[in-house]
Image: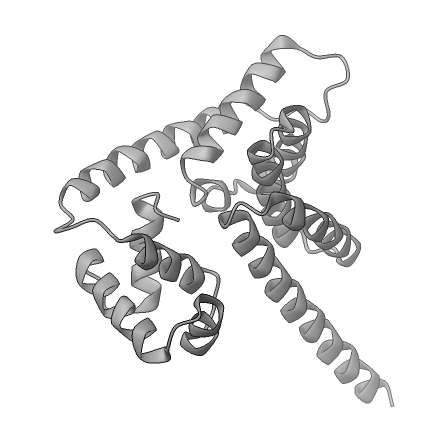
Amino acid sequence: MAFEQERAANAQNAADAALVVDRLTLARLLHAQGQHREALPLLVELGKTAAAAGRTGTLIEILALQALTLWAGSKKERAVSTLAQALALAAPEGYVRTFIDEGQPMAELLSEVLEAQQRGQPDWPPRVPTHYIRKLLATLERDDAGARSLAKRLPEPLSGRELEVLQLVAAGKSNRRIASELFVSVGTVKTHLNNLYRKLDARSRTQAVARGRQLNLI
């Protein structure tokens, strides 16, 4: 009986984790499409779920994206406070890629967090080590310089439709789902993907997404 209960609990945990990943992907897509009002309540709900389940790594990612969504929606103070919460959780474990992969918007927000801490606001949430924020900013600056260098070597820029396809690929969408959302055929999606691979010098969806993030395209 105990074994069966444990197996059932593990299955439920796996299902819950998969649901969180799926909904986080949706929130990321909404954010990329500029639908910040739609993304925000979804991220708040996901944050509560991750916190209750003790999934710290997932919670950090959710809070980072929530901060960027608030920032894009001109909710500056809430964005800074939310990112500070994420950083306070991330600093002890030295998380880097979770923030770096978000590109230049994250650099702007990190700078705001650093300035707010230096101003010593009385109602500031748990403080984040300054050296940790500076490390993230330095890494972002280095990655940005590399991205600009890579961009100059692109044979030709991506079209608007190719960028849309790349964003949907990054959100984990299948070719059929992309075709449905863009109201085109699966064959057309495959053509766009082939163009993406050629322009980004990629051989797979994963490589294309990685190059797109390096170039701050997504």
Q: Nearer the viewer, residue 200 or 90?
A: 200
Residue furthest to the front: 183
* Vertical comparison of 118 with 95: above or below: above
Q: Position of residue 163 (x, y in %)?
A: 34, 54
Residue ID at (72%, 72%): 13
* Vertical comparison of 85 with 101: above or below: above
Q: Position of residue 95 (x, y in %)?
A: 52, 43
Q: Position of residue 193 (x, y in %)?
A: 28, 68
Residue ID at (45%, 45%): 97
The N terminus is located in which quarter? Answer: bottom right
Task: Say whether residue 69 is left or right of residue 6.
Answer: left
Residue furthest to the top: 119
Task: Say whether residue 199 is left or right of residue 166.
Answer: left
* Vertical comparison of 54 with 86: above or below: below
- Asked where in the image residue 161 lies, by quadrant, the reply is bottom left
Q: Nearer the viewer, residue 165 or 86?
A: 165
Q: Nearer the viewer, residue 216 or 110?
A: 216
